[in-house]
C-alpha cells in the first residue's frame, strides 16, 4: 500500500512537471474559476451580512396599543404571544417609555422639543423567529381589540416580502453560478488529464499488460488532478485574501448606507471551501478523464 | 475434432470450441480446440490475418471469445471478472514485435517497472531486475535508454521485463519480426533457455527458418481454423510445400 502510494505520488509529481505547459494551463484555468467561485462566496456572504442586518430590524413588529385599552387586555395578548411558537420574544413598552426613547433619539431632537403631551402609543414589540411569520403576527395583531385602529402596526408587508424574495433569488443565483463553475472546472481538469493520459497511453498499455490494477494506473492521475486543484485553490485563495479588505473598504466608501463589513472569520471557511472544492474537482475531473484509457 | 497432443504434462492452456467474431462481423477464429501442456514450446504459424494475433489477444484476455471456453491453469479466463485480470496477467510474460518499451525510462527502469507495478519492495525489484538483465546478456547497460539500443537489444530488454516476475508462461507475438536473421536467432536462443527452465512458451511467428530449424510443436492457423498441429513440425507441411513446388 505504502509502496503503491509512493509510486503514485512520484508518478503524479513527475507527470505534472513533464507536462508543465498543460499543467500550468489547467492551474490557471481552475484558478480563474475558483476566483470566480470565491468572489461568488464572498458576495454571497456580504449579502447575507446585509440581509441579516435588515432581518434583525424587520423581524421585530411593533403593535400599537390604543390609549383606552385596559392593561389587562394588553397582558392577555402578551401572554398569548409568549407561548406562540412563532415568537422569539415579547416586550411591552408603555407610552412613557416610548416617549422617553423618542426624546433620547438625537434624530428627533427638534421634533421632541415641540411635543405637547404624549402623542405616542404604548407598544407591544414582538420578535419573530422566522421572517416569514411577521405577516401572520401582523394579522393576529390587527384582529386584537386593543390595537390602535388608525395605526395598528409598523409592518411593511411589501418590503419584507420583497426582501424575502430577493434573498431567495440571490441564494438560487449563487448556487446556480457555483454549479456552473464546478461543472466547467471538472471539464477543464478532465481534458487536461485526458491530454496527459494521451501522452502516456503507451505507458498505461504496458502497465496493464504487466498486471497493474486499475487503481494502480488511475491513482497517479487522480493525485495529479488533486495537486492541480490544490495549487489553483491556493493561488485563488491568496489573491482573494489580498483583495477582500480593500474591496470592502471601497464598497463602504461608495455605498455607505449598506452595512457591509470586513469579516476575517469568513476567510477560514472560504479557505476550507476553496481547498476542498479544488481538490475534489481535480479528483473527479481526473477520475472521469482517465476512465476510458484505464479500463482493463 | 479436438487436437490433443499426447503429452504427459498437465495442460496449462486449453481452448475448447472457441469462436471469435468481431463486432464488424469478421470471423477471426472458428471452433478452435487446442491444449498446451506445461513446459511446451509452441509456434503459432499461418498467413497474416489467419487469426494468430486474435488467439494471442484471447490468451492475454484483451479480447473475450464469442463462443467456447478458454482455460488457463484450470481457470476459465473468458468469464474472469475485470478486477481479477491484473492478477491473471501477472502469471504471464509478454513479448511483442514492437517491444513496447517506455522510451523515457532506462533499461533498468523498464525492467523494474513490471515489478514496481506489483508493488514489490525495492530490494527485491533491484535483485530481480539485475538477474533478468544478466539472463538476457544486458548487464552493464542498465542506465542506457532504449533509443540508444539496437533492435535486438531492445527485444532483450522486453524479454527481461517479461521474465522479471518469474512467470510460468511466456506469450510472444512476432518477437523476431523486426530483427535481422542473426539477431532473431539470438533472441530465439533466449526463449529456448527460458523454456528449458520450465516455462511454457507460446509464440506467434512468421519466421519460417527458425520454426523449421527448431522442430518444435507447430500449430498452423488458416482462415481462423487450426489447419495443422504437429508435435515436431515445420512452417509449411510437406503437402503444401509440394503444392508450392508444383506451381
Image (cartoon, coloured by chain):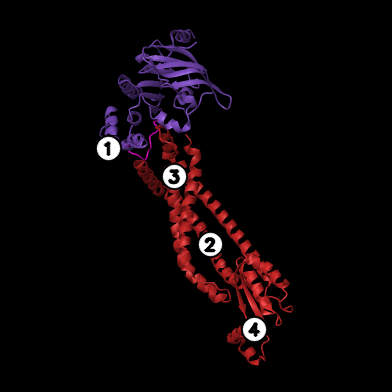
Chain colours: A red, B purple
In the image, residue B100 above or below residue B25:
below
- Which chain is home to disc 1? B
Q: Which residue is identified by label 2?
A: A41
Taking A128 as reference, is B44 left or right?
left
Estimate the spatial distance between the alpha carbons at disc 4 and disc 1, rounded to whole Å. Answer: 91 Å
- Which chain is home to disc 3? A
Q: Main SS type for the magenta part?
A: loop
Taking B51 as reference, is B8 left or right?
left
Marked residue nearer the N-terminal end (3 or 4)? 4
Residue B170 horizontal/vertical position (percent): 37, 24
Which residue is more in the foreground, B93 or B233? Answer: B93
Which portion, as a residue range, is magenta?
B98-106
Instruction: Judge whether residue A100 is colored magenta.
Output: no
Residue A84 horizontal/vertical position (percent): 63, 66
Q: State if disc 2 and disc 4 touch (CB < 8 Å).
A: no
Estimate the spatial distance between the alpha carbons at disc 4 and disc 2, rounded to whole Å. Answer: 45 Å
Q: Share a chain, discs 2 and 1?
A: no
- Of the residues tagged 4 and 2, which is closer to the observer? 4
What is the crowding at mark 4: few (fewer than 14 residues within 10 Å), some, or many (at least 20)?
A: some
Q: Which residue is identified by label 4?
A: A95
Q: Residue at x 58, y 24 (%)?
A: B25
Q: Which residue is identified by label 1?
A: B123
Estimate the spatial distance between the alpha carbons at disc 3 and disc 4, rounded to whole Å. Answer: 73 Å
Q: Share a chain, discs 4 and 1?
A: no
- Residue A43, disc: none
Amino acid at each position: 500500500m505504502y509502496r503503491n502510494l509512493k509510486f503514485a505520488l512520484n508518478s503524479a509529481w513527475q507527470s505534472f512537471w513533464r507536462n508543465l505547459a498543460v499543467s500550468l494551463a489547467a492551474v490557471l484555468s481552475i484558478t480563474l474559476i475558483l476566483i470566480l467561485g470565491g468572489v461568488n462566496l464572498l458576495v454571497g456572504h456580504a449579502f447575507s451580512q446585509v440581509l441579516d442586518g435588515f432581518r434583525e430590524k424587520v423581524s421585530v413588529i411593533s403593535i400599537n396599543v390604543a390609549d383606552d385599552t385596559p392593561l389587562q387586555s394588553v397582558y392577555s395578548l402578551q401572554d398569548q404571544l409568549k407561548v406562540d411558537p412563532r415568537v422569539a420574544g415579547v416586550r411591552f413598552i408603555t407610552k412613557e417609555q416610548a416617549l422617553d426613547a423618542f426624546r433620547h433619539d438625537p434624530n428627533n431632537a427638534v421634533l421632541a422639543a415641540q411635543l405637547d403631551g404624549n402623542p405616542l402609543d404604548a407598544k407591544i414589540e414582538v420578535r419573530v423567529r422566522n421572517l416569514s411569520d411577521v405577516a401572520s403576527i401582523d394579522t393576529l395583531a390587527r384582529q386584537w381589540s386593543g390595537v390602535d385602529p388608525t395605526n395598528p402596526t409598523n409592518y411593511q408587508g411589501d418590503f419584507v416580502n420583497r426582501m424575502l424574495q430577493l434573498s431567495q433569488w440571490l441564494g438560487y443565483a449563487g448556487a446556480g453560478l457555483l454549479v456552473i463553475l464546478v461543472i466547467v472546472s471538472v471539464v477543464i481538469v478532465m481534458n487536461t488529464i485526458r491530454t496527459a493520459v494521451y501522452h502516456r497511453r503507451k505507458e498505461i498499455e504496458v502497465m496493464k499488460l504487466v498486471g497493474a490494477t486499475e487503481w494502480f494506473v488511475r491513482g497517479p492521475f487522480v493525485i495529479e488532478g488533486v495537486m492541480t486543484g490544490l495549487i489553483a485553490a491556493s493561488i485563488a485563495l491568496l489573491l482573494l485574501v489580498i483583495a477582500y479588505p480593500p474591496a470592502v473598504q471601497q464598497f463602504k466608501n461608495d455605498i455607505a448606507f449598506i452595512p457591509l463589513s470586513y469579516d476575517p472569520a469568513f476567510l477560514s471557511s472560504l479557505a476550507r471551501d476553496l481547498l476542498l472544492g479544488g481538490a475534489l474537482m481535480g479528483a473527479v475531473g481526473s477520475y472521469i478523464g482517465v476512465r476510458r484509457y484505464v479500463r482493463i | 475434432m479436438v487436437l490433443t497432443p499426447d503429452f504427459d504434462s498437465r495442460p496449462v492452456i486449453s481452448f475448447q470450441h472457441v469462436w471469435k467474431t468481431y463486432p464488424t462481423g469478421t470471423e477471426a477464429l472458428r471452433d478452435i480446440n487446442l491444449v498446451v501442456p506445461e513446459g511446451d514450446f509452441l509456434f503459432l504459424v499461418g498467413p497474416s490475418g489467419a487469426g494468430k494475433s486474435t488467439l494471442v489477444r484471447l490468451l492475454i484476455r484483451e479480447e473475450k471469445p464469442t463462443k467456447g471456453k478458454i482455460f488457463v491453469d484450470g481457470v476459465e479466463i473468458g468469464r474472469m471478472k475485470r478486477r481479477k485480470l491484473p492478477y491473471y496477467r501477472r502469471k504471464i510474460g509478454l513479448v511483442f514485435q514492437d517491444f513496447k518499451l517506455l522510451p523515457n525510462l532506462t533499461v533498468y527502469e523498464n525492467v523494474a517497472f513490471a515489478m514496481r507495478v506489483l508493488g514489490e519492495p525495492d530490494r527485491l525489484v533491484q535483485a530481480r531486475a539485475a538477474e533478468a538483465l544478466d539472463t538476457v546478456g544486458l548487464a552493464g547497460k542498465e542506465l542506457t535508454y532504449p533509443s540508444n539500443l539496437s533492435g535486438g537489444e531492445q527485444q532483450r530488454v522486453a524479454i527481461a521485463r517479461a521474465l522479471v516476475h518469474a512467470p510460468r508462461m511466456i506469450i510472444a507475438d512476432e518477437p523476431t519480426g523486426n530483427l535481422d536473421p542473426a539477431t532473431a536467432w539470438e533472441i530465439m536462443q533466449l526463449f529456448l533457455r527460458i523454456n528449458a527452465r520450465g516455462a511454457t512458451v507460446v509464440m506467434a511467428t512468421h519466421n519460417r527458418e527458425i520454426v523449421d530449424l527448431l522442430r518444435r510443436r507447430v500449430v498452423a492457423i488458416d482462415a481462423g481454423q487450426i489447419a495443422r498441429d504437429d508435435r515436431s513440425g515445420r512452417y509449411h507441411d510437406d503437402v503444401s510445400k509440394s503444392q508450392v513446388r508444383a506451381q
